[in-house]
Image (cartoon, rainbow, N blue to C red):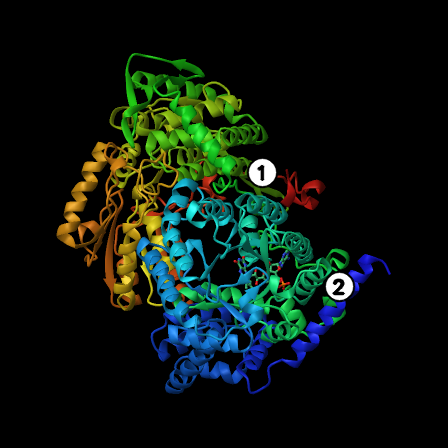
Amino acid sequence: MNQSEQFHQRIVALGREIFELADAARPHVWQSAWWLEQTTRAMDHDPRLRSRAFQFVDCLPALRDRAEIARHLGEYLDVPGVGIPKIARAVLRPGRLRRLREEFVGRAALMGATQMAGRFITGFDVPSVIRTIERLRAQGMAFTLDVLGESTTSDAQAERYARVYHDLIDRLTPLAARWPTIPMIDRDSHGPMPRVNFSIKLTGLDPHFDAIDPERAIRRVGDRLRPLLQHARQAGAFVNIDMESSKHHDLTLELLKRVLMEDEFRDWPDVGIVLQAYLKEGERDLDDMLEWAAQRGTRFEIRLVKGAYWDAETAAAVRNYKEPPVWTSKWQSDACYERMARRMLERCDLIRPAFASHNVRSLAVACATAEELGIAPRDYEVQQLFGMGDPLKTAMVRLGRCVRVYCPYGDLMPGMGYLIRRLLENTSNEGFLKQSFGDRGSHDRLLADPAVAKPPSAALPSRRYRNTDPEEPMLRFINASNTNFAVAANRQKMAGAIQYVRGDLGRTYPLVINGQSVSTEERFESHNPSRPSEVVGKVVSASTADVDRAAASARKAFARWRSTSARERADILRKAADRLEMRRFELAATMILEVGKPWREADADVTEAIDHCRYYAEQIERIESRPRLRNIPGEDNMLTYSPKGVCAVISPWAFPLAILTGMTSAALAAGDTVVMKPARQASVVAAKLVEVFEHAGLPSGVLNFVPGSGETIGRHLIEHGEVNIVAFTGSQEVGAIVIRAGAVVRPGQSFIKKMIVEMGGKNAILVDDDADLDGAVQAVIESAFAYAGQKCSSCSRLIVLDGVYDAMCTRLREATESVAIGPADEPATLVGPVIDEDARSRVRRYVELGRREGRVLVEAKLPTDCAEGYFVAPTVFVDVAPGARIAQEEVFGPLLAVIRAADFDQALEIANGTRYALTGGLFSRSPANIDRARREFAVGNLYINRRITGSQVDAQPFGGFKLSGTGVKAGSPDYLLHFMDARCITENTLRSGFVPDDVRNEDHTEVS
Ligand SMILES: Cc1cc2nc3c(=O)[nH]c(=O)nc-3n(C[C@H](O)[C@H](O)[C@H](O)COP(=O)(O)OP(=O)(O)OC[C@H]3O[C@@H](n4cnc5c(N)ncnc54)[C@H](O)[C@@H]3O)c2cc1C
């Protein structure tokens, strides 16, 4: 037998021994763990029941009383397709047996879920934690304590999170000194090990732990981490930093490398980090950390895990049409784990290895490799999660290994994410635990080498569509992706682009008429609202005579453009999309400087522009290749569309590229020609878009560019006799003027102008009393304050149900105080300046009004680097009456009015009680209330349990009604039809009673 066969045999022997020991320690019917196993098994047979049950568990901590619990349980489980017994259905149904329902069902559900939480969460207070960890030690197991509460939304929350660790250090370390020594877990060959051990998540230490600005994140998190490490070191405790999702991965390692190299920590061995084997880059990470360990010169611990965020990582990648950073077959993660385990054990001189897994094969490999390398069992650890695979822990202790149990501590509310991850793992078909202990799979199969057996994995979730029409070609539309700023190269590109655009400041941008640049002395300057002294560009200002020439040239070009094929027009749009993609950083940088859009917002603006071009290219090909036929014997009927003529595109500065490109590309796709008049404040971005279209091969005269004042140039264009369509997006006041002006039929005008008018909103988010408040706060902050609340989709009203009003306000105040405000070119900025001095004065007037109409809950502090620009501090007013002006008028600034609602009926009434109907949001975990909002919340775009901004072309066609717009949806399959005239052509094909054969039998549905 060769060495490798011997090694394999040893793994199998160890694995079998672990299984036998674990089987002997399996729970019995009188133990709660047995019941959990049975429940888990029942859920396995019904995936719908599983997901509804998880959703119910997720909302449970937010429910106030048994009646609420019983109501929610009924809403989640008493639905068609969820397999529950008839008797349970009868009890859950509202109206009948109400008392029984509330008493019995409410109580039982609460008990069940609390027990389930108690299985995975060590304790809700310090005494219960102490009891648990002392019990674990009595069983020969060490612990690492994790305070629940990842992903904070405010500095105050982060401070509280850090304080809990400080307190725990103070409470536990004196106690630990009195615990009897257990040699296997309290000493290794290098000496005594700390008995008190903590695991910390960095996202809990800062609401801005965001890789977009690593230096800032490292500074801020480092400032909270250092005192904690100092305190732990002084008290003799151990600190491990957990690894979270991939967007935090590089930042976490970078921060740790820097802090642990500082003089006060460099010689401290009692720290640990985590590496994830499910990452394709896992081995490279390990090599990198080993190299760093050699430089540091003091041992530390590396905990090897597979990784807890596989579902989230793959879903995010699929959503963005990207390759996931994680392996996509389970065996690949397993095999990578084994390779990394060996490498870690080989470098025991540099690190203390810890193997966190419930997979018997993975653990057997680690143990067998350690044996082969002659490493003593106390010189590495086996780590497992509290409440998961308990027989396995007992087995590993009996096998003489150093076992450490990961013990989460804290309230159920912040721990919900953790609990759901554990439930997912316990019931996952791919998971080893379920296969080995749940399904009792064959031990030999489970112990097989993953790299050889390569068992198949479930397919990745695909980007699924609710396919209402299998013939619909748009279902294949692939949206462009936003830039991932966790990638250093992307951050460098954006910073480089800002520098490049800065190097080009002050350039003059001419008009473009009939393909010619036209320059006159009449110019206006476009300023950077973050630093108004910076002139972004000088723009030639069109006169009314220029508009006349532009309209005439568009009219002339129309004759040719309308007769180009849909394919030719679509090709030009696709080329434009490619050029936008090529210039995406430069265009985003231009928006950052010209209109004060923060990095992510500017980047998303480019993405949307790209989508518009590609989407309308596909749409026009579909429309032209598939005219609607309704042929009957002897008569052919065809519904077809043709372009209208010249389109005036008048766009806002709020989405300087996305909306401008959307309206322009739709007109061009339809076969119309365009006279473009962008908002003055965003004319440089618009000039660059014109360049993009020129380079894409648009013939002269098809797109004309006449920047200038809205009142003179805009008005002249709208009223112009050559203009057939006006595509306008802007404020409600101006929109109303546009509609009036366009409605007049002037002498010589032989058509009615088509007005496609998108206006503002007074958008509300409604927070139900069972909502996830942390999720709601985060979404409200992003929706209300990102880009200083200047999107038409921004949230400016928050309607909160009485039951959670105070709690929501507290969180909102803390989160608003922590919002990142600054110049838009700072990568971490969420709230930049408002667009100009006029806007600032107007918003400030509303601040004064808000003070009179409500109470200021919080007015954030403006940092010093906001002194020059047009900044307004994000401000929240509470106790605002639904009819107050601050709750009714469109402001376009970072102001939020909070309104209290007695119940859900009233909340909906308030939400619908404005003249607008653009976007709206609901945070609720009641399926019944979600259904009601779907039916009754009257807005063009309703978002449930997410932010209300950031619509995607095709997925969320955008546009409102009432005084928000004319009910037209940009980015929808029917948008282009508004730029065209519908024509029906009927031909009598009967010739003296003879029906031509070809017509009678032809299948017209696929005419192309
Ligand atoms: C003590 C302890 C501490 C932990 N700390 C962390 C931490 O800091 N950060 C962290 O991310 N996780 C952490 N975990 C969680 C850990 O990553 C999961 O518990 C672990 O992934 C489950 O792996 P397993 O070896 O126990 O089980 P297995 O059933 O063998 O593996 C399941 C894992 O395989 C991977 N996987 C599943 N399906 C696929 C697929 N189709 N393709 C590729 N891979 C797949 C996933 O990572 C999944 O979790 C910790 C776990 C323990 C026990």
The kind of residue tagged 2 is Ala
Q: Which residue is mark 2?
A: 448
| Disc 2: residue Cβ within 8 A of ligand 1's nearest atom | no
Horizontal side of residue 466 vs 681, given as left or right: right
Q: Is residue 891 visible?
A: yes
| Disc 1: residue Cβ within 8 A of ligand 1's nearest atom | no
Outermost residue to the left: 852
Horizontal side of residue 478 vs 62, given as left or right: right
Q: Residue 563 is drawn in which quadrant? A: top right
Kind of element beneath mark 1: strand
Name the mark on residue 101. Answer: none
Q: Mark 2 or mark 1: which is in front?
A: 2
The kind of residue tagged 1 is Glu
> What residue appears at the point 34 percent right and 74 percent down from the top-left corner?
64
> What residue appears at the point 26 percent right and 46 percent down from the top-left corner?
874
Residue 912 vs 873, above or below: the answer is: below
Q: Mark 1: give few (<14), some (14-19) or many (20+) Cα within 10 Å.
A: few
> What residue appears at the point 43 percent right and 70 percent down from the top-left corner?
177
Lower sequence index among marks 2 and 1: 2
Residue 207 vs 591, above or below: the answer is: below
Q: Which residue is mark 1?
A: 987
Kind of element beneath mark 2: loop
Give the quadrant of ligand 1: bottom right
Q: Residue 718 is drawn in which quadrant? A: top left
Nearest the viewer among 873 and 523 is: 873
